[in-house]
């Protein structure tokens, strides 16, 4: 097919005037600017998406989708409540737990923790704690074993390993002839889990539910029920409906309520970064304006000849608009390739930088997780490329109109 002369001229004007025919330096600068801006935006948003997704996955691996608690006392009939919960179509599983605060002592080391007693037969249905254990499984917490699961950071802090004894003191006292003493019990470290979130790895410990009911003296009753819902984004609605269905008199919460401010801040930060980095693309398109203005000035003789031969103003505008569209298209394409490549290698690049410089760029104590996952979302990537292309086309409006408004008689008079 014969190529329209507007596109042919646009491609010719983008090339240098030398015989090698390489793209001119200023065109390369324009394409590079758009490409780098697109790549940076893809990389940043992919990292933030990965951070949000991985954090959500790890949190939900330890924290249930929703929970039902007794008000000021344990649940009296948790077995019946569990049967009602799993009978609903929107709840896939339910497991009881006993929870309280305590202190863990090993030698001269001491740490405050949350103690959670779990039913080893049901816990794996509402959390992924079993998959986080370094060795063994939840069977190590069989009833009467008085074994405890501690997080990796907690184990390092107390300098204990599997098989070591620790003393658990809980926030309840026992009256004795010699006075009021804190309730305590010696446990053996049965296993070590690693959730990848410092808050849990440092401040959470698991024991069997039977041992917990004895230690906290709940008389076999559970503190609450942990629920796994089929759609995690409707967890708040589901748990409220379940509470109403059971007659109320319970306290309910869900993961969106517990971490709503945290995930909202991540989303707000991502939106702000998208706007700011979109401005970087806008700045890069200013280079397209300067490029086309120079081309219009340099090719005004050609424009005058075309106009004298009968070319319409719209055709002249199409010549220069095609140049901007080409720059935007190529720049967005190069940025797409570069952004996807770097986004897929970010975690490896961070590891290399940490080993080279001997620093910890992502401390778990500060950023909650110690690695830097990425998640590429097709819709966002397509939106970024589309924005870059549209801005590049819009940048051609002023130079194209300027070229179309030139008067051939005035230009040819001085040629």
Image: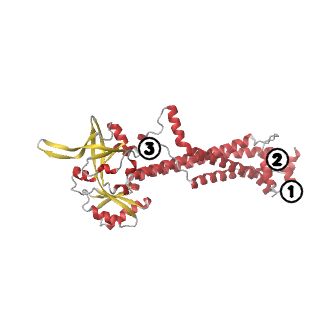
Q: Is residue 291 left or right of residue 299?
A: left
Color encoding of the figure: secondary structure
Q: Is residue 84 visible?
A: yes
> What residue sits right under mark 2 in the picture?
300
State the image coordinates of residue 157 (x, y, percent, origin top left).
34, 37
Q: Nearer the viewer, residue 220 or 135?
A: 135
Q: Is residue 214 above or below residue 80?
A: above
State the image coordinates of residue 349 (x, y, percent, origin top left).
54, 39
Q: Earlier in the sequence, mark 2 or mark 1?
A: 2
> What residue sits right under mark 3 in the picture?
369
State the image coordinates of residue 49 (x, y, percent, origin top left).
51, 50
Q: Residue at x 32, y 54 (%)?
A: 120
Residue neighbourhood size for the residue with mark 2, other residues' Cα within 10 Å, grouped as few (<14), some (14–19), many (≥20)? many
> On the image, which quarter does residue 251 sit in?
bottom left
> On the image, which quarter does residue 176 sit in?
top left
Residue neighbourhood size for the residue with mark 3, other residues' Cα within 10 Å, grouped as few (<14), some (14–19), many (≥20)? many
Q: Earlier in the sequence, mark 3 or mark 1?
A: 1
Q: Is residue 410 above or below residue 121?
A: above
Quarter of the image with the C terminus in it: top right
Q: Residue 310 — which label? A: 1
Q: Is residue 331 left or right of residue 367?
A: right
Q: Earlier in the sequence, mark 3 or mark 2?
A: 2
> On the image, which quarter does residue 17 sit in?
top right
Q: Nearer the viewer, residue 218 or 186?
A: 186
Measure the alpha-carbon separation of dots 3 and 2.
Answer: 59 Å
Residue neighbourhood size for the residue with mark 1, other residues' Cα within 10 Å, grouped as few (<14), some (14–19), many (≥20)? few
Q: Residue 387 — which label? A: none
> Regarding mark 2 in the picture, which secondary structure is present there?
helix
Q: Nearer the viewer, residue 235 or 210?
A: 210
* Callout 3 touching callout 1 (CB < 8 Å): no
> Regarding mark 1 in the picture, which secondary structure is present there?
loop
């Amino acid at each position: 097919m014969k190529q329209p002369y507007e596109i042919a001229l646009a491609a010719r004007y983008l090339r240098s005037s030398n015989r090698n025919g390489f793209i001119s330096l200023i065109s390369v600068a324009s394409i590079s600017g758009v490409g780098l801006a697109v790549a940076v935006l893809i990389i940043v948003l992919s990292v933030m998406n990965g951070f949000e997704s991985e954090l959500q996955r790890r949190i939900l691996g330890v924290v249930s989708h929703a929970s039902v608690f007794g008000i000021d006392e344990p649940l009296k009939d948790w077995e019946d409540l569990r049967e009602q919960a799993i009978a609903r179509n929107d709840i896939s599983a339910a497991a009881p737990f006993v929870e309280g605060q305590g202190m863990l002592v090993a030698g001269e080391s001491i740490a405050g923790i949350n103690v959670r007693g779990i039913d080893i037969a049901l816990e794996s249905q509402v959390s992924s704690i079993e998959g986080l254990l370094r060795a063994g499984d939840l069977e190590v917490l069989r009833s009467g074993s008085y074994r405890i699961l501690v997080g990796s950071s907690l184990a390092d802090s107390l300098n204990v390993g599997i098989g070591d004894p620790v003393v658990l003191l809980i926030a309840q006292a026992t009256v004795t002839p010699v006075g009021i003493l804190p309730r305590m019990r010696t446990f053996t470290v049965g296993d070590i889990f690693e959730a990848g979130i410092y808050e849990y790895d440092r401040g959470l410990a698991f024991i069997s539910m039977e041992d917990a009911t004895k230690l906290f003296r709940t008389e076999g009753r559970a503190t609450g029920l942990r629920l796994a819902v089929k759609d995690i984004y409707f967890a708040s609605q589901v748990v409220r409906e379940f509470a109403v269905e059971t007659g109320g008199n319970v306290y309910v919460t869900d993961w969106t309520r517990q971490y709503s401010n945290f995930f909202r801040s991540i989303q707000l930060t991502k939106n702000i970064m998208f706007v700011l980095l979109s401005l970087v693309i806008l700045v890069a398109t200013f280079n397209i304006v300067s490029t086309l203005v120079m081309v219009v000035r340099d090719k005004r003789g050609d424009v005058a000849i075309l106009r004298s031969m009968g070319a319409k103003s719209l055709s002249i505008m199409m010549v220069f608009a095609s140049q901007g569209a080409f720059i935007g298209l190529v720049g967005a394409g190069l940025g797409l390739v570069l952004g996807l490549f770097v986004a897929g290698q970010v975690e490896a690049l961070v590891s290399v930088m940490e080993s080279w410089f001997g620093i910890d760029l992502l401390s778990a104590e500060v950023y909650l997780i110690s690695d830097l996952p990425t998640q590429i979302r097709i819709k966002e990537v397509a939106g970024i490329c589309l924005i870059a292309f549209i801005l590049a086309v819009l940048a051609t409006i002023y130079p194209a109109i300027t070229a179309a408004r030139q008067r051939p008689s005035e230009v040819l008079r001085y040629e």
